[in-house]
Image (cartoon, rainbow, N blue to C red):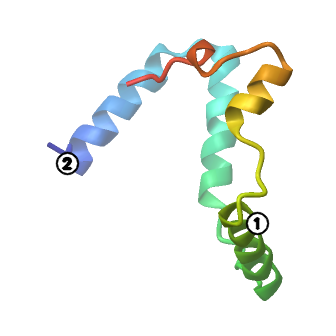
């Protein structure tokens, strides 16, 4: 069940209150970036996005398992957080 806006704000404030001062600046900077993320998407952006999708759909991409193996890693090295 989704939280209502007031619950979301309360939980966010509670988490901010727990942060050490050194990390608070990073969170503030992230929030500023999120608020300023109104750059329009250009036709060039759309074209390159669709080219990327077509590239991977053609099977030319490198499987993630192969990339990780190149660094001596496996997908299990990155547990999913819930």
Image point 59% across, 19% down: which residue?
A: 78
Crowding at dot 1, Cα within 10 Å, few <14 / some 14-19 / many 20+, comes out as few
Residue that appears at 65% across and 41% down = 30
Q: Going 80% across and 74% down the picture, which residue do you hit? A: 48
- Residue 42's label in the rendered image is none
Disc 2 is placed on an element classified as loop
Sooner in the amino-acid sequence: mark 1 or mark 2: 2
**Foreground residue among 30 and 79:** 79
Left/right placement of residue 34 relative to residue 42 reads left
Image-based side of 12 in relation to 43, left or right: left
Nearer-the-camera pick, 39 or 55: 55
Task: Name the image quarter holding the C terminus.
Answer: top left
User: Where 2 falls versus 75 (above or below)?
Assistant: below
Quadrant of the snapshot with the N terminus = top left
Q: Secondary structure at mark 1?
A: helix
Pointer 2 residue: 4
* Mark 1 lies on residue: 55
On screen, residue 80 versus residue 3, left or right, reads right
Against 54, residue 46 (above or below) is below
Residue 44 coordinates in the image, percent (x, y): 83, 82
């Amino acid at each position: 069940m989704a939280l209502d806006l007031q619950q979301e704000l309360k939980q966010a404030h509670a988490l901010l209150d727990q942060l050490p001062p050194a990390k608070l600046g990073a969170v503030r900077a992230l929030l500023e970036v999120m608020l300023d993320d109104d750059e329009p998407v250009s036709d060039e952006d759309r074209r390159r996005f669709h080219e990327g999708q077509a590239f991977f759909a053609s099977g030319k991409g490198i499987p993630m398992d192969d990339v990780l193996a190149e660094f001596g890693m496996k997908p299990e090295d990155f547990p999913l957080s819930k």
